[in-house]
Amino acid sequence: MLESLKGAWRYRQFIATSIRHELVTRFARSRIGGAWMIIHPLSMVLIYALILSAVLSAKLPGIESQYAYAIYLTAGMLGWSLFSEILNRCLGVFIENANLMKKLVFPKIALPVIITGSCLINNLALFAVILVVFAVLGHFTPSTLLWVPVLTGITVLLALGLGLMLGILNVFIRDIGQLMPIVLQFLFWFTPVVYPAEIVPPSLQAILSFNPLFHLVGAYHNVLAYGQAPSIPALAGLTLLGAGLVFLSALLFRKASPEMVDAL
């Protein structure tokens, strides 16, 4: 793992240039450019808010706003969108860059690092827009905003650890790439992003609590929607889980790396 980090550091200029090139080429022919980075997640928030706010707005005590449900949903989407984007993109990172891996000599670990950097920029832009939207709606939680970078770091650990592991396995077992979008759909609805956890029956809440994203998205809700500090024990557990996933994926990467190019 240490050697992988050293390799990524040696190629830091390549990584930075690749991130910039990816962002530029993605919107090269677009009239509104990088605005698409925030239009997509915000449009999903708007759709859910319009459809479900009338049903759930009365069940959100603790948020003093007539737009309580939209605020709750937006806070949860900030964490979910970062997790799902990193995971989805890591899933096919080695397959999509097969020609690059065969033609150039560089540490393969740089590829998921580039993806993570690009996703973080997208998430930062979305967060900035969310703050503006909250300000317009009259919703302020300045005392807890410093928790957002902590939650972002934990989200990256979980998404990168799981995504890198699945991305490596997907090189050898292509069914994983077909299965994961289905799994993510189930995971989305088993995570309280679009509904408050309180409306779930207690018996089901006990089952949902085994989902790490249940606690992570809940922390985003506490910080951004309710203005409360997240649970420290829950964050500590998520951090250990994320670090463990990153460590395991690094071991798998070191073992599988020599065979990956041949498999591609």
Image (tube, grey):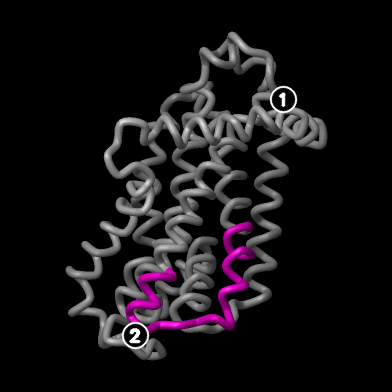
Q: Does the magenta-highlighted stretch encompass residue 150?
A: yes
Name the residue: 39% across, 81% down.
198
Q: Which circle marks residue 255 in the picture? A: 1
Q: What's the amino acid at mark 1?
A: Lys
Q: Which circle marks residue 169 in the picture? A: none
Q: What's the amino acid at mark 2?
A: Leu
Q: Is residue 215 visible?
A: yes
Q: Quadrant of the N terminus?
A: top right
Q: The residue tagged with tag 2: helix, strand or loop?
A: loop
Q: Is residue 4 above or below residue 143?
A: above
**Rendered image quadrant of residue 72:** bottom left
Query: How far across and down, in percent of the image, does residue 96 sit?
Result: 46, 23
Query: How far across and down, in percent of the image, does residue 14 sit?
Result: 65, 27
Query: How far across and down, in percent of the image, does residue 239 sit?
Result: 67, 60
- So how many labels did they put on this image? 2
Name the residue: 21% across, 62% down.
47
Q: The residue tagged with tag 1: helix, strand or loop?
A: helix
How would you rate the neighbour count of disc 1 (Cα within 10 Å): few for under 14, some for 14-19, many for 20 or more?
few
Which stretch did the figure color magenta? Answer: 131-153
Name the residue: 42% across, 54% down.
81
Task: Report the mark closest to the observer, 1 or 2.
Answer: 2
Q: Does the magenta-highlighted stretch encompass residue 117?
A: no
How would you rate the neighbour count of disc 2 (Cα within 10 Å): few for under 14, some for 14-19, many for 20 or more?
some
Name the residue: 80% across, 33% down.
6
**Rendered image quadrant of residue 126:** bottom left
Residue nearer the viewer, 193 or 128: 128
Query: How far across and down, in percent of the image, does residue 61 sit?
Result: 37, 90
Mark positioned earlier in the residue sequence (1 or 2): 2
| Main secondary-structure element of the magenta-colored stretch | helix
Q: Which circle marks residue 60 in the picture? A: 2
Residue nearer the viewer, 173 or 21: 21
Q: CA distance from mark 1 to mark 2?
A: 48 Å
